[in-house]
Each structure stands twice: as C-alpha cells, then as structure tokens.
Amino acid sequence: MLSPWTRGRRILVTGGAGFLGSHLCERLLAQRNHVVCLDSFQTGTLRNVAHLCQNSRFSIIEHDVSIPFTGEFDEIYNLACPASPPHYQADPVQTTRTSVLGAMHLLDLAHRCNARIFQASTSEVYGDPHVHPQPESYCGNVNPIGPRSCYDEGKRCAETLFFDYHRCYSVRIKVARIFNTYGPRMRPDDGRVVSNFIVQALQGSDITIYGEGNQTRSFCYVDDLIDGFIRLMESSGHATGPINLGNPAEFTIRQLADLVIELTGSRSRIIYQPLPTDDPQQRRPDISQAEALLDWKPSVPLKAGLMKTIGYFDALLRKTDATVLE
Ligand code: NAD
Ligand code: UDP
C-alpha cells in the first residue's frame, strides 16, 4: 500500500546514477513518483539507470551539484558525492566542493520550493570512533587534516548546513548517517572492500586485506538501506535525524575475506597490504533510534546479500563487451 504522501511527487535525486542513487530512483519510480536523476557521472554511470530511461516519469540531467540548479520539486534526496576512499581522495578539493557547496545550493533550492530534503550523511562523521557502537549523540573522532578529511569534514559541514537551514529558515530536513552498504551496481573498480574482494575472488587474483584485517565494519545490503531512506523521508516532520542507518552485525575484514572466498569457491590467496592513514579500527551502528522512530531494521543477512552481489558481479564480468566496465 503506497503512502499518499509519496504518490506522484516530483522528486530530485542527486547522485542518482551512482550505486545507491540508482536503487533509490528505481524504488521511487515504482511508487509512481516523477523522478529527476541529477548526476555529474564522476563515479556513476548511465548503465546503472539505463533500464529506467523508458519510463516517462524519469529523466536525467548531467550537472555538478557544486553549481546552483533550479527546478520545482516536492522532495530532494542529496546523494551526490563519491563514497569510496580512492575516488573521493582522487580530487579532494572537488569532494569538499561537492559536499559543502552542493548541500548549500540544494538547501537553497529546497527552501525556495518548500521541499523536504534528505541528506546522505555517513558513519564517517564518527571518524575512528572511541565509542562503540556509535549512537547519534557521539560527536566523533575525526582528523581534520588527513587524506580522509575532505569526505569526513565535508559531510560534517553538510550536516551543519542542514541543521542551520532548519533552524534559521525552517527547511524540512532528513539526515541519515549511512554505514557501509553494498550490493549490485557498485562499480567493479569502486575500491571499497566488498566489491574489491568479490571481483578479486571471481577473477582468481589476490585478495587485498589492508592492515591485519582485525578492523571491523558492519555491512548493510542495499535494499534494506533504501527502505530506511524512504521511511525517514516519509516520517513526521519533527524527525529530522541525524539517524543511523546500517546493519549492526559486525565483522572483521578478515572474516569478510574468508566468507567471500567460501561463497565464490575461489582459489584466490589473501595478501596483506599497508593500512591506509586514519582507517577507522571499528564501526557498528547503534540503530535504536531508527527502530523506535522508523520501525526500521535490516533484514538481509551478510551471507544472503553477498550471494546476490556475487551473482551481479559474476554476470557483469562474464560479459565480453569492454564498454560494460566503463
Ligand atoms: P557512488 O560513488 O556510487 O555514487 C555517488 C554518485 O554521485 C555518483 O553517481 C557520482 O557520479 C555522483 N556525483 C559525485 N559528485 C557529484 C557532483 N559534484 N555533482 C553531481 N553528482 C555527483 O556512491 P554511493 O555508495 O552510491 O553513495 C551515495 C551517497 O551515499 C554518497 O553521498 C555517499 O557519501 C553516501 N554514503 C554511502 C555509503 C555506502 O556505503 N554506500 C555510506 C555512507 C554514505
Ligand atoms: N579494505 C581492505 N581491502 C580492500 C579495500 C578495503 O582491507 O581491498 C579495508 C579498508 O582498509 C577498511 C575496510 O576494508 O578498513 C572498509 O573499507 P571501505 O573502503 O570499503 O570503507 P570505509 O573504510 O570507508 O569504511
């Protein structure tokens, strides 16, 4: 049953051609909304949304969110920003521009349209946390000048802007702090751990653990996360967040490597490479707020989500057409 609130709304999804954005566009279209996917294609691809292009309620605009943009919308989901460390560190100044200027321009747009606006924030606002698991009240342990700072501090500043626009101009905001999420439509060269390990296992190349593999992450399957996005956007006005969205089941990176090898039946070896600077040692969301306010918790266990993701990459890598991997 569709909520009347979401039926036939005009919705802008920035970063809509990326991994999460493409799943979100798909879900919003299935709810019979009109969806504009805005993307600079820095890390996103047309391939992710090609199957939506026949839908008359879907359109794509190539644009950089750090440059102002106009239109009339009921809702804005701001997902534009590369999320993988090698990609966001490749042009760190652009990453900060995307996060900070992008947030400001989109908040101006939301203010003018009186639209609800959702921000894809991140568990990276907690940095290398000293509190475990991380509740929303934890202010974090972030290095402001390291190689990850363009992303972490950019997202922190974006949250600041969201709450200041809410307090000063009554903009209706919804801020989600997303923990590591994986699934189909990640790029094979995305660089994040789940896609790296699966692609390495399927290709029989070495599986690269950074550090000793004792660091932990909590992995959420994409379908669960998108459900959380929509529940948050549809929640009552006072539920601004920030709210943690992620799967609290915590694994070491070594456990993840072993599981991927088991599920793919791969003969790949595990090799150890240096741990990147400021790599967080542990991470697990406290999702009690999401459970209480949104009646949300993830339902896909890691093994089941990995099987679906492995199926996606297996099919992708089997295609001989080189353009598929562009
Ligand atoms: P992604 O890299 O697949 O998608 C990001 C999209 O934003 C891409 O399509 C890219 O081309 C687009 N983009 C980048 N800069 C842009 C700009 N200046 N203007 C317009 N478009 C731009 O990453 P993702 O995993 O889909 O992440 C989506 C959002 O969710 C990001 O904001 C990310 O910070 C946030 N997030 C994701 C995760 C996760 O685990 N996937 C975790 C925390 C936060
Ligand atoms: N990682 C790894 N091998 C890889 C890619 C990542 O061991 O090929 C590690 C990385 O050092 C980090 C964890 O896996 O400790 C998660 O990395 P990812 O880039 O996926 O996400 P983030 O660090 O942003 O949480």
Image: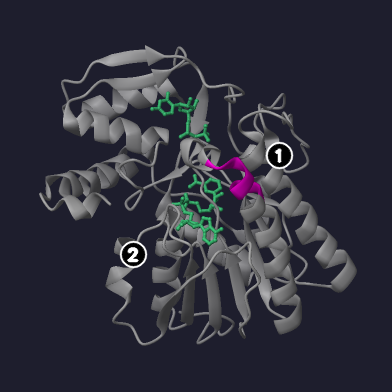
Residue 174 seen by the camera: yes
Residue 295 lies in quadrant: bottom right
Mark positioned earlier in the residue sequence (1 or 2): 2
Closer-to-camera residue (60/164): 60
Closer-to-camera residue (131/150): 150
Closer-to-camera residue (215/99): 99
Secondary structure beneath dot 1 equals loop
Residue 286 seen by the camera: no
Please identify the dominant SS of the magenta region.
helix
Q: Is residue 259 left or right of residue 221?
A: left
Q: How much space separates mark 1 and mark 2, taking CA atoms?
A: 36 Å
Q: Can you tell which of label 1 and label 2 is closer to the viewer?
A: 2
Q: Is mark 2 within 8 Å of ligand 1?
A: no
Q: Residue at x 82, y 66 (%)?
A: 166
Residue 226 position in % (x across, y down): 48, 59
Q: Which residues are magenta?
A: 91-96
Q: Is residue 271 left or right of residue 163?
A: left
Q: Amino acid at mark 1?
A: Pro
Secondary structure beneath dot 2 equals helix
Please, is residue 111 above or below residue 187 in the view? Answer: below
Closer-to-camera residue (77/148): 148
The colour scheme applied to this rendered structure is one colour
Q: Is mark 1 within 8 Å of ligand 1?
A: no
Q: Residue at x 47, y 36 (%)?
A: 86
Label drawn at residue 46: 2
Q: Amino acid at mark 2?
A: Leu
Circle 1 is placed at which residue position?
Answer: 135
Residue 22 position in % (x across, y down): 40, 63
**Dot 2: few (<14), some (14–19), or many (≥20) neighbours within 10 Å?**
some
**Dot 1: few (<14), some (14–19), or many (≥20) neighbours within 10 Å?**
some
Please, is residue 319 above or below residue 212 in the view? Answer: below
- So how many labels did they put on this image? 2
